[in-house]
Image (cartoon, coloured by chain):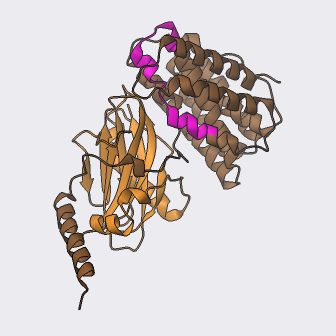
Chain colours: A brown, B orange
């Protein structure tokens, strides 16, 4: 015999099950996000061109003004190379926006040299070649795709040899450079919609968590970035509020300072 | 009881089972990724840039997982879910940071492929919920790719 409580439980389950079946084909209109994990882990970090694409829709951007010609110092410390590699790939996306073929080709070579510096040159050689070829043909979509493939291949190669932390630094370098350019563009022609593109608090928390897990990297630049992210967090984590021009300016100052630190020796 | 209800009661709610995922490197997830990319193919002709990076894993029938993704207002996104298991049924849906369904109505589910479309009203974090609704396999590999324009 089924005890009453169990019978009741089964009935409730059956009833709910039938109700859910009726709606199974349709997604619920609302879910309880408090039940979701609060930790942002292993996210797919957006590429700079994802943000640049959104910026382009807000009005014409003089991308040529944001192309960086400084090739940066040569480092021997792998974490520094990883950070620099991320920023150089981001610079590649800026150069594509500017349709600057010579710079794209230089970046292709630079990416290859940096990838060799951290021991993943082999997986990058075909991409670097493809970047240069696509730039020669002014096939900008092809260059974009190869830059994405480059970053993905670098990170996969690092993950395969359990260098996940370096892989995360590549993403971080790219995100910082992307944010520097974003804030630079929005600062020049402020609009609330442009500033809203900075609303990335979970992504910032993700990088903060990752940096906290890198105590072995005792390089000043890593700690400077960690401190800077603490400064940036309240400026972009505004909930449903708007990000003011002053905050955009401040984030630009911080990311520009970091960008300079990434490409130059301590 | 259907798979959705099973997962709901077994796990103390589908959302309790939600975890963030890392790209998985295994032959089967790679196969699933090939199917997800196959679903994405027609959209490339419409100007969508499909990311090389992706999420993947395996789920039992009726199980769901969520990934959090930063989306930017002004862009338009498609998320494509695929599995190599022919007779599996999968779904993908997009919610905003308040837990409200945020996707456009033209998402679709066709057996072992599914897709969801969103034109974000605000820039911020979104939750992509993937599910294996039905499958003849005990565990079903899946992969999720996305594209934007």
Magenta region, mostly helix, strand or loop?
helix
Q: Quadrant of the C terminus of chain B?
A: top left
Please indicate whether residue A26 sits to the left or right of residue A183 in the image: left
**Residue A115 appears in the rendering:** yes
Relative depth, front residue between A5 and A61: A5
Query: As displayed, is residue B25 above or below residue B95?
Result: below
Residue extending farthest to the front is A4
Q: Is residue A206 magenta?
A: yes
At 31% from the left edge and 32% from the top edge, which residue is drawn? B119
Residue A9, located in which quarter of the rendered image?
A: bottom left
Query: As displayed, is residue A15 above or below residue A174?
Result: below
**Residue A132 appears in the rendering:** no
Residue A189 place in picture, x, y as percent: 46, 8
Relative depth, front residue between B39 and A265: A265
At 70% from the left edge and 54% from the top edge, which residue is drawn? A162
Residue A260 place in picture, x, y as percent: 72, 19
Relative depth, front residue between A101 and B102: B102
Q: Quadrant of the N terminus of chain B?
A: bottom left
Residue B32 place in picture, x, y as percent: 43, 59
Please indicate whether residue A84 sits to the left or right of residue B109 in the image: right
Please count the marks in the image. Answer: 0
Q: Is residue A169 magenta?
A: no
């Amino acid at each position: 015999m089924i005890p009453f409580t169990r019978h009741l439980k089964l009935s409730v389950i059956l009833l709910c099950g039938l109700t859910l079946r009726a709606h199974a084909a349709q997604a619920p209109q609302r879910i309880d996000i408090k039940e979701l994990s609060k930790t942002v882990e292993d996210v797919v970090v957006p590429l700079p061109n994802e943000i640049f694409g959104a910026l382009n829709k807000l009005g014409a951007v003089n991308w040529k003004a944001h192309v960086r010609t400084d090739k940066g110092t040569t480092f021997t410390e792998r974490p520094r190379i990883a950070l620099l590699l991320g920023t150089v790939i981001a610079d590649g996306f800026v150069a594509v926006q500017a349709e600057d073929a010579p710079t794209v080709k230089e970046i292709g070579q630079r990416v290859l040299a940096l990838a060799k510096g951290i021991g993943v040159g082999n997986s990058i050689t075909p991409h670097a070649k493809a970047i240069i070829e696509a730039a020669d043909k002014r096939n900008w979509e092809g260059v974009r795709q190869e830059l994405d493939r480059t970053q993905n291949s670098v990170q996969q190669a690092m993950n395969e040899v359990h260098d996940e932390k370096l892989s995360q630094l590549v993403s971080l370098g790219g995100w910082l450079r992307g944010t520097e350019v974003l804030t630079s563009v929005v600062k020049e022609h402020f609009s609330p919609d442009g500033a809203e593109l900075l609303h990335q608090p979970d992504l910032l928390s993700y990088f903060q968590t990752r940096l906290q897990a890198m105590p072995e990297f005792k390089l000043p630049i890593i700690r400077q970035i960690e401190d800077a992210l603490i400064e940036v967090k309240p400026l972009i984590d505004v909930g449903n509020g708007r990000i003011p021009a002053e905050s955009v300016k401040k984030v630009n100052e911080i990311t520009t300072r970091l960008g300079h630190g990434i490409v130059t020796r301590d | 009881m259907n798979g959705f209800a099973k997962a709901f009661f077994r796990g103390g709610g589908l959302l309790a089972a939600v975890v963030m995922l890392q790209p998985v490197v295994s032959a089967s997830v790679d196969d699933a990724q090939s199917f997800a990319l196959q679903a994405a193919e027609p959209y490339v002709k419409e100007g969508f840039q499909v990311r090389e990076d992706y999420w993947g894993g395996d789920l039992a029938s009726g199980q769901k997982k969520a990934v959090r993704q930063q989306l930017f207002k002004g862009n338009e996104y498609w998320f494509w879910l695929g599995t190599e298991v022919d007779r599996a049924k999968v779904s993908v849906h997009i919610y905003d940071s308040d837990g409200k369904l945020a996707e456009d109505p033209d998402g679709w589910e066709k057996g072992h492929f599914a897709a969801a479309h969103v034109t974000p009203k605000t820039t911020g974090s979104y939750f992509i919920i993937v599910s294996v609704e039905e499958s003849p396999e005990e565990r079903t590999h899946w992969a999720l790719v996305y594209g934007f324009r």
